[in-house]
Amino acid sequence: MIFNALVFGALLAHSASAQNMLRFACSQLTIERADPLVNPGMVPTPHTHQIIGGNSFNISMEPGTFDPVKESTCTSCTYSEDFSNYWTASLYFRSPENGSFHRVPQFANVGLQQDGGMTVYYMPYSAQNNKMTAFKAGFRMLAGDPSETKNNRISICHRCLGNGEGFAPCDSKDTAELPKKYCPKGIRATIIFPSCWDGKNLDSPDHRSHVAYSNAGGLGTPRCPSSHPVAIPQVMYEVMYDTGRYSDQKYYANGKQPFVYSFGDALGYGQHGDYLFGWKDDSLQRAMDALPTGRCANANCSVLKIQSAQDSMKCKKKQHYQENVGQNGEWLKELPGGVKVMN
Ligand SMILES: *[C@@H]1O[C@H](CO)[C@@H](O)[C@H](O)[C@H]1NC(C)=O
Ligand SMILES: *[C@@H]1O[C@H](CO)[C@@H](O)[C@H](O)[C@H]1NC(C)=O
Ligand SMILES: *[C@@H]1O[C@H](CO)[C@@H](O)[C@H](O)[C@H]1NC(C)=O
């Protein structure tokens, strides 16, 4: 196991005192079939996403012309200068009794206060010479791939909480796939983004090739490949799914588990995350530069503007395509968009 992952794990285990990274809550902004990165302009898109961040989120957000900082009037994140959008697939419980679907609600991570949404991390572990180059306006990227059929635990993983937790994110106690057993304290989905950039392109046709994982993949190690020499903050999402409520042991009989992602993946290899940068001015760079000074950590970075949990929870947005995706706990006869369960 790499040293940095060990350090990170130790920090994470004591997250209240963890230094040297931002770790903060973003509440739910909207849950809808929209994806301005992969399917710009399409209403509705094939599958449901849960979206957090600035309320300028729209079906189309062209780099260079669309400015989330100018267009947003609020953000669902702790840091009120962060109008970025972050999104992932939603997770559904499929009843083995009647085949109906129920969106798995989310809960707040340790020490945080939020309404659904996710935990967002900006980590410096890949910093070369301790220097981190924050993203430029218009930057966006993807991690994971809904069509992934291989185990890629290094960047996409699930932890079965309440069952003998692991240490660092995506370590050997985590699984690439959705856990096959009952997870009484929830399932934590982790999405780790690349930490190296080609230094030129804000995006690329596949939204991936302008960025790269550092040499050992997954959580950053100190060296970026020469094709992508610029160390960028390593973005990571954690999504805390409240699976404890689906406790009937028969849901987990015969090595099966009852959960499926909104794009039909019941295995979980295809979990993915989208990132669209939208921090105001140089605020993210300021925060990255302040990390080594100890004046900036987690959800209490003194060089950034912080809003109350109440204010961040108030920032909501109506769906562009209005439909029932189980956002209020409704049971659905099928996955939104008629998506079929694949595996
Ligand atoms: C979304 O985009 C459309 C046009 O593309 C625009 O008319 C609308 O005002 C935008 N909404 C928000 C909230 O930015
Ligand atoms: C389907 O079954 C679940 C239990 O597995 C139950 O809670 C739910 O109410 C049922 N839904 C419908 C629409 O029958
Ligand atoms: C946040 O940091 C400031 C100093 O930068 C400190 O006074 C305050 O107690 C911290 N708050 C929390 C909740 O950690």
Image (spheres, rainbow, N blue to C red):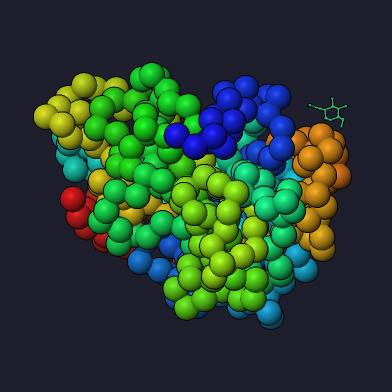
In the rendering, at what x and y percent does residue 24 appear?
66, 39
**Which image quarter: residue 10?**
top right
Q: Quadrant of ligand 3?
A: top right
**Residue at the image point whose x is 72% and y is 54% from the top:** 132
Q: Is residue 54 above or below residue 12?
A: below
Q: Is residue 113 above or below residue 83?
A: above
In the rendering, at what x and y percent does residue 135 appear?
69, 63
In this view of the protein, which residue sits in the foreground, 78 or 194?
A: 194
Q: Is residue 95 left or right of residue 325?
A: left
In the rendering, at what x and y percent does residue 127 appear?
67, 50
**Residue at the image point whose x is 65% and y is 57% from the top:** 232
Let me know if residue 99 appears in the view: yes
- Report the number of discs: 0
**Residue at the image point whose x is 68% and y is 24% from the top:** 16
Q: Is residue 206 above or below residue 149?
A: below
Q: Residue furthest left?
A: 254
Let me know if residue 43 appears in the view: no
In this view of the protein, which residue sits in the foreground, 157 or 84?
A: 157
In the rendering, at what x and y percent does residue 159 appear?
39, 32
Q: Which quadrant, please, contains the N terminus?
A: top left
Q: Residue furthest bottom?
A: 65
Q: Is residue 246 above or below residue 29?
A: above
**Residue at the image point whose x is 64% and y is 58% from the top:** 231
Q: Is residue 335 left or right of residue 207?
A: left
**Which image quarter: residue 63?**
bottom right
Q: Is residue 275 left or right of residue 301?
A: left
